[in-house]
Image (spheres, coloured by chain):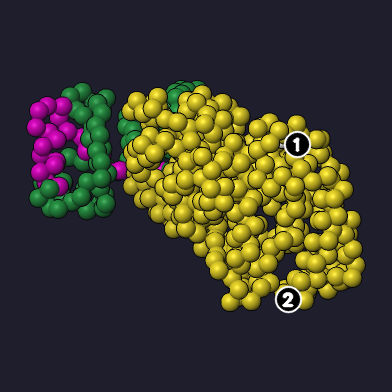
Amino acid sequence: MGNYYQPEIETMPRAQLQALQSERLVEQVRRVYENVPYYRAKMDAKGVTPDDIHGIEDLHKLPFLSKADLREAYPCGLLAAPKKDCVRIHSTSGTTGKRVVAFYTQHDVDLWEDCCARAIVAAGGTDEDVVQVCYGYGLFTGGLGLHGGSHKVGCLTLPMSSGNTERQLQFMEDLEATILCCTPSYAMYLAESAIETGVRDRLHLKSAIFGAEAWTEEMRHDIEDKLGLKAYDIYGLTELSGPGVAFECAEQNGMHINEDHFIAEIIDPVTEEPLPLGSKGELVFTAITKQAFPMIRYRTRDICMLKAEKCSCGRTHVRMCKPMGRSDDMLIIRGVNVFPSQIETVLLNQGMPANYQIIVDRVNNSDTLDIEVEVPQELFSDTVSAISKKEKELVSALKAMLGIMAKVHLVAPKSIARSEGKAVRVIDKRKLY
Amino acid sequence: MLLKQISVFLENKSGQLLQIVNVLAEHDIDLRALSIAEAQDYGVLRAIVDKPDETLALLREQEWLCSANEVLAVMVPDEPGSLTRILNVLADNDVNMVYTYAFLSGVEGKACIVLRVDDNAAAEKLLRNAGIEC
Ligand SMILES: [Zn+2]
């Protein structure tokens, strides 16, 4: 028992917690309806008004919000607080046009940092700890989110940001960092470097908080063994605040959702109907305390399951499993959001047939993107120059579209495997879900 | 003389060439010469056969990516210095050669040199004017 940052909230009896959610939901719905024309139009279109919402049992009456809405309302169309009350923005990585800009009031930052503080305390953090934050600082939410949470707990915070492994390891050793916050793939890299350089045995790490990308139980055990620490998972989305929407406790069996701030639902991604607790479906969140950028029934596209069983840690908030996949076809490659449709567009623009296959893998802890494309008859001649010229053109056009390098392989026509006549477009060998 | 050459796209995996050679053998097609240009992931097989049109149709039917084009064939005495004479003529006239390969012609004492240049007819004329049989 113990290890709570806000015990009265984290262990609140469920009936009380649900009453709190209902109260906040009713208030939030009224606020967005009155302050945000975009929400009002969506609710009007669905024939629902704030008067129809009396509590969480009415949540299903509200319209969904999707990434397309965020793009349409970009940049300020979903802002629910006066801009002068906002103190910060964060933004998702991704290609131009796919960016999401999220706004925060001071109150929003404060609550977000509380959520991160809960995660740090759950991972054993106290004001005696030294927290090394090697998530990127800046538009990305990882760095500043955990940084703020670490301050709240009173930990000595090392704002390292990402990169410069040698310096990371030196500070980790010299300042005796006890808690590491970074992406699991970077942790793997740090672990290997620490072992190689012999620093490993002079480290004081006891726990780590890993998020921002998918990782497996195998990776967890591997990093835990290599660095001699306990690794905790954390979940979040820029749209909802950042890391800390949900976090793992010492049980390491699902992440407790901060339900006093976020109401979670699981829906059928096709019918959009809510599914009973324990079913596998798409995770939908409603942010009930956010002022500047409240999300009502935001479709995360993450496929997930919720667990209501009581946790031995004493927290009453439901747990979510690691996301098991996505309900859209988005791939996250080296932290960048990639849609197969973008790749298809490039191929068609370059006069290539839409017979292609995307192969994503992870080699030496770094994601690789390979694209196999069938060579059209008109491109083929007795020399290799026309084909290799096209290969180079494709690589640079893909770089321009995606923002990351892809390897292009030209293959013979009809050589890309088709199942039941339909091509398998994406092969993700990373096995992260 | 101009010969019809068959080119086939080969993926960089084992057994591709063997499959093609088998197809030719099964249909009694005589493979006179072949060369392969290789890139990172693929190669281009170039072949001189006795029945080019039939070969092309056959390979297309089996869904190989292939094409046919004309190349310049020059018969030279199978002796030192033969190729030098040809290359000298082409170099002196600024003819850009894309690739070349050679095979024994079947005619006693003669080799056949295949030349791929931008303009076959012009190169043929230049060589004839220089007294080279082609
Ligand atoms: Zn727990």
At which x and y percent is residue B2? 30, 43
Judged from the image, the secondary structure of the residue bearing numbered disc 2 is helix
Q: Which of labels 2 and 1 is toward the front?
A: 1
In the rendered structure, does residue A285 fall within the stretch colored magenta?
no
Q: Which residues are magenta?
A: B68-90
Chain identifier for the green-coloured part of the image? B
Instruction: Say which amino acid is labelled 2.
Output: Asn
Q: Is residue A109 left or right of residue A12?
A: left
Q: Residues within 10 Å of mark 1 (few under 14, many from 20)?
A: some
The chain that hosts pointer 1 is A
Q: Give the Cα distance between marks 2 and 1.
A: 38 Å
Q: Which of these two is toward me, A381 or A262?
A: A262
Q: Is residue B79 left or right of residue A22?
A: left
Residue under the image location 43 percent in, 46 percent down: A158
Instruction: Say which amino acid is labelled 1.
Output: Gly
Q: Residue furthest front?
A: A128
Reading the image, the residue beneath label 1 is: A314
Quarter of the view holding residue A421: top right
Residue under the image location 53 percent in, 48 percent down: A154
Sooner in the amino-acid sequence: mark 2 or mark 1: 2
Look at chain A in the picture and name its colour. yellow
Is label 1's Cβ within 8 Å of ligand 1? yes
Judged from the image, the secondary structure of the residue bearing numbered disc 1 is loop
Quarter of the view holding residue B42: top left
Residue under the image location 83 percent in, 65 percent down: A26
Q: Residues within 10 Å of mark 2 (few under 14, many from 20)?
A: some
Which quarter of the figure is the C terminus of chain B placed in? top left
Vertical comparison of A61 with A354: above or below: below
Question: What numbered label is drawn on residue A35?
Answer: 2
Vertical comparison of A290 with A142: above or below: below
Both labels 2 and 1 in a single chain: yes
Vertical comparison of A191 with B122: above or below: above
